[in-house]
Image (cartoon, helix red, strand yellow):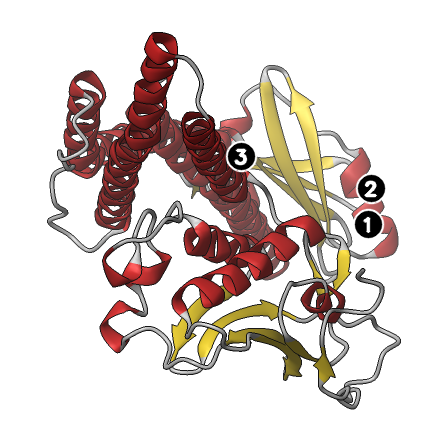
């Protein structure tokens, strides 16, 4: 079932159910009211007959004096004396006789009472009231007034029919209204569906879904999906550039390697040729290794192993270390490679013979690792570009151009960031503290000179 059909059925059923519940409540209230009105009418008529029997007893035997209408039918009246013998009857009774048991009870205890009986095919509601012991043949007796309950039943049955018809009519109207509303509400979704099918058919990442005309849920969905498509387009373009750049970077060492192999095949091996082959193979291996490392960093999930970042810093091949104890959740091997890349970058682009220093310190809820050299750092306009893939500062270099890209990917996988400023390069990661640890920062350790402890 479609969303439109489900919504229409739900609206129709909900409307019908609401009306049925309301009709049931009205039915109970109306039935109670009608029965109370019938009882009130019977009691009032009984009082009138009792007063007539006491004030003008001769009128009881007058034909038609006891007949009166209750609703759409004639009331039935029967008057008995103190011995429960019939004194007078209404013409509406015909040949029927009302039960004398209820009148006898009224004579005995002097109280009026209601009763419901089946008389022939009719269901009757009776009320018996005592007559004052004043004068006349009915003195000290009782009067019984009866009326059929068919009028009440017919009214309730008519109410049932009206409620059912009203429920059906309102349910149909609700279904039609819902259909019209759903038609307008689902029209933007139909446009989105057609546009998404076209994007899937053409696989064109530049296509977009139709813009929203209203700031409702469908409009927000279209905006979100268009943002997702734009992100996918950027990712696809970045992937295309990466493949093109990787192909270009691999072409150079492969071309040199093929040339040297051809030279080897024609003229035999020489020490210089073998050295060139070794350089080409090493460059190619380093480039492939960096590509694999970058791919792993971008595809791996966030690590959950506790790592002392100060120990990682001491393992770096730097000239000096300032390391305060701080723990992060991380991948030790990946962090060591990132720090080694920063140190190698500092040695390659820093002043010749300059000292490279690694510093680690907690900064609030963050752990900060900084690698500095004795140079001025990258130019302000290059501080963001240095982390791009295959970008080399200073007009080139013999590196792969992937070292700092690996650093940034590692930092982001650990929930942090990597950036460059005038002081050098910094990796900033979330610090990890156990629940039992205090929030105080341990005192810093002294500046260490030379290789880390335990390094040969």
**What residue did someone put label 3 on?**
90
Mark drawn on residue 107: 1
Q: Quadrant of residue 349?
A: bottom left
Q: Is residue 138 left or right of residue 204?
A: right
The residue to which callout 2 is attached is 104
Q: Residues within 10 Å of mark 1 (few under 14, many from 20)?
A: many
Q: Position of residue 110 (x, y in %)?
A: 81, 57
Give the Cα distance between marks 1 and 2.
5 Å
Mark with earlier residue (2, 3): 3
Residue at 82% over, 70% down = 434
Within 10 angstroms of label 2, few (less than 14), some, or many (20 or more) residues? many
Relative horizontal placement of residue 231, taking residue 142 as reference (left or right)? left
Vertical placement of residue 384 versus 67, above or below? below
* Residue 232: x %, y % from top left: 29, 38
Q: In which quadrant of the rendered view does residue 423 lie? A: bottom left
Q: Position of residue 97 (x, y in %)?
A: 66, 25
Q: Are marks 3 and 1 in contact (CB under 8 Å)?
A: no
Q: Secondary structure at mark 3?
A: loop
Q: Are marks 1 and 2 in contact (CB under 8 Å)?
A: yes
Q: Would residue 56 be visible to someone looking at this image?
A: no
Q: CA distance from mark 2 to mark 3?
A: 19 Å
The CA distance from mark 3 to mark 1 is 20 Å
**Which of 159 and 95 lies nearest the eye of the viewer?**
159
Front residue of 305 and 98: 305
Going from N to C along the chain, the mark reached first, 3 or 1, is 3
Q: Secondary structure at mark 2?
A: helix
Residue 227 in the figure: left or right of residue 426: left
């Amino acid at each position: 079932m479609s969303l439109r059909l489900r919504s229409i059925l739900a609206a129709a059923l909900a409307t019908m159910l609401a009306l049925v519940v309301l009709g049931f409540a009205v039915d109970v209230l109306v039935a109670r009211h009608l029965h109370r009105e019938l009882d009130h009418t019977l009691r009032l008529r009984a009082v009138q007959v009792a007063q007539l029997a006491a004030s003008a007893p001769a009128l009881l035997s007058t034909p038609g004096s006891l007949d009166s209408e209750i609703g759409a039918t004639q009331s039935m009246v029967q008057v008995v004396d103190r011995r429960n013998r019939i004194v007078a009857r209404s013409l509406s009774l015909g040949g029927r006789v009302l039960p004398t048991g209820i009148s006898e009870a009224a004579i005995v205890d002097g109280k009026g009472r209601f009763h419901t009986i089946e008389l022939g095919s009719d269901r009757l509601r009776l009320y018996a009231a005592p007559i004052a012991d004043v004068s006349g043949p009915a003195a000290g007796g009782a009067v019984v007034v009866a009326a059929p309950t068919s009028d009440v039943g017919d009214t309730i049955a008519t109410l049932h029919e009206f409620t059912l018809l009203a429920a059906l009519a309102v349910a149909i109207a609700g279904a039609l209204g819902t259909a019209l509303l759903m038609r307008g509400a689902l029209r933007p979704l139909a446009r989105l569906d057609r546009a998404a099918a076209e994007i899937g058919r053409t696989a064109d990442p530049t296509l977009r879904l139709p813009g929203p005309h209203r700031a409702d849920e469908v409009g927000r969905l279209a905006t979100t999906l268009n943002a997702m498509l734009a992100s996918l387009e950027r990712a696809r373009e970045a992937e295309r550039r990466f493949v093109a750049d990787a192909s270009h970077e691999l072409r150079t060492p492969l071309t040199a390697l093929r040339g040297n192999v051809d030279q080897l095949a024609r003229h035999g091996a020489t020490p210089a040729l073998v050295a060139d082959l070794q350089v080409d193979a090493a460059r190619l291996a380093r480039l492939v290794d960096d590509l694999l490392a970058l791919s792993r960093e971008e595809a791996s999930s966030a690590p959950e192993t506790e790592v002392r970042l100060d120990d990682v810093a001491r393992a770096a091949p730097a000239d000096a270390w300032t390391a305060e104890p701080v723990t992060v959740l991380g991948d030790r091997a990946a962090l060591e490679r990132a720090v080694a890349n920063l140190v190698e970058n500092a040695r390659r682009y820093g002043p010749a013979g300059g000292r490279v220093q690694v510093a680690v310190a907690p900064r609030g809820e963050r752990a900060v690792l900084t690698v500095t050299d004795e140079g001025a750092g990258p130019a302000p306009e290059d501080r963001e570009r240095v982390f791009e893939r295959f970008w080399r500062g200073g007009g080139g270099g013999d590196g792969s151009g992937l070292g700092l890209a690996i650093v940034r990917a590692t930092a982001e996988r650990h929930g942090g960031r990597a950036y460059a400023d005038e002081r050098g390069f910094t990796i900033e990661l979330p610090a990890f503290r156990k629940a039992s640890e205090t929030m105080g920062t341990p005192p810093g350790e002294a500046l260490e000179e030379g290789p880390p402890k335990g390094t040969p």
